């Protein structure tokens, strides 16, 4: 090939190559900024999903009590707090006991299907929905009444609640990890109060902590819902 022609072609291609390179670099920078921001946001939310100390829980509950006038909501939150650090997570674990269940801590086989722990031997306790149900049994409801009005599993607990805005959360309201219908499983907690900055915090029996804890929402709780039960009972606004 004629070297002059080849040189001209290279000169014509060089600006295009530079523009393409700049475009690729720009896209790479933007993608890095976008995904980097997402990674930072996830890290912050995950950092918030840690158990609160006893002092932080007491403070949050007192803050909640300052703005909540419904005695039953406060009673539910107080009973939820009473189990913090006392009951291990057990897939399928339920209890209709009033007060602490003597069965908690007994080594039992996990018989419920669908968990990595299925078929293993573990100290008996509660799962997340069983914890919520237990809190309402403490309000004088029978197990049958709890099943009817609150629900014993996350699906029925979702079904017996109404979606609300996050800013409208009150002590005693529920939060869920996923919206139904879902095939991703679910997790539920109860709002027990608020941090100094107004951030709500939640009591829940968590597999990840293998106990009842109080945490912020972190990157776990995303859906706020209000139990229909409160309205049925003629709650105080």
Image: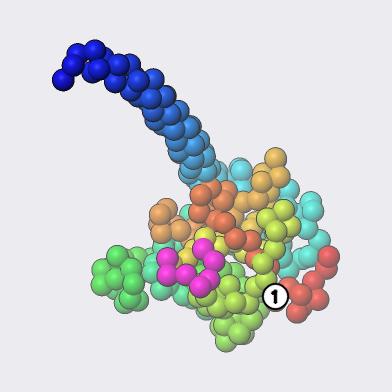
Reply above or below: 150 against 11. below
Residue 53 seen in the figure = yes
Rendering coords of residue 25 (x, y %): 40, 27
Q: Quadrant of residue 174?
A: bottom right
Rendering coords of residue 225 (x, y %): 65, 65
Q: Is residue 39 left or right of residue 10?
A: right
Which residue appears at 40% of the width and 54% of the height? 208
Start-end of magenta stretch? 178-184
Q: Which of the colour schemes (rainbow, by chain, secondary structure, one colour) is used? A: rainbow
Residue 76 seen in the figure = no
Q: Nearer the viewer, residue 175 or 196?
A: 175
Quadrant where the image shows the N terminus: top left
Which residue appears at 79% of the width and 71% of the height? 235
Reply above or below: 171 against 27. below
Query: Which residue is under mark 1?
Result: 228
Q: Is residue 199 left or right of residue 32?
A: right
Q: Is residue 94 left or right of residue 61?
A: left
> How dense is the environment of label 1, judged by Cα within 10 Å: few (below 14), some, or many (20 and up)?
some
Question: Magenta stretch: dominant SS?
Answer: loop
Quadrant where the image shows the C terminus: bottom right
Reply above or below: 104 against 203. below
Which residue appears at 33% of the width and 76% of the height? 113
Which residue appears at 68% of the width and 55% of the height? 166
């Amino acid at each position: 090939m004629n070297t002059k022609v080849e040189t001209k072609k290279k000169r014509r291609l060089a600006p295009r190559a530079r523009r393409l390179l700049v475009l690729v670099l720009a896209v790479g920078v933007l993608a890095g900024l976008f995904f980097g921001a997402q990674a930072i946001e996830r890290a912050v939310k995950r950092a918030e999903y840690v158990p609160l100390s006893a002092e932080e829980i007491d403070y949050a509950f007192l803050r909640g009590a300052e703005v909540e006038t419904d005695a039953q909501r406060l009673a539910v939150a107080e009973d939820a707090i009473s189990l913090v650090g006392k009951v291990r997570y057990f897939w399928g674990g339920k209890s209709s006991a009033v007060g602490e269940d003597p069965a908690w801590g007994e080594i039992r086989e996990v018989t419920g299907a669908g968990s990595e722990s299925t078929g293993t031997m573990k100290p008996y306790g509660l799962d997340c929905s069983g914890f919520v149900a237990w809190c309402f049994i403490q309000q004088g409801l029978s197990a049958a009444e709890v099943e009817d009005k609150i629900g014993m599993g996350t699906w029925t607990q979702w079904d017996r609640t109404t979606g609300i805005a996050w800013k409208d959360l009150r002590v005693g309201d529920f939060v869920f990890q996923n919206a139904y219908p879902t095939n991703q499983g679910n997790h539920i907690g109860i709002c027990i109060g608020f941090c100094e900055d107004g951030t709500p915090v939640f009591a829940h029996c968590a597999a990840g902590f293998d106990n009842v804890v109080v945490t912020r929402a972190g990157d776990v709780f995303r859906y706020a819902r209000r139990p229909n039960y409160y309205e049925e009972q003629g709650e105080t606004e």
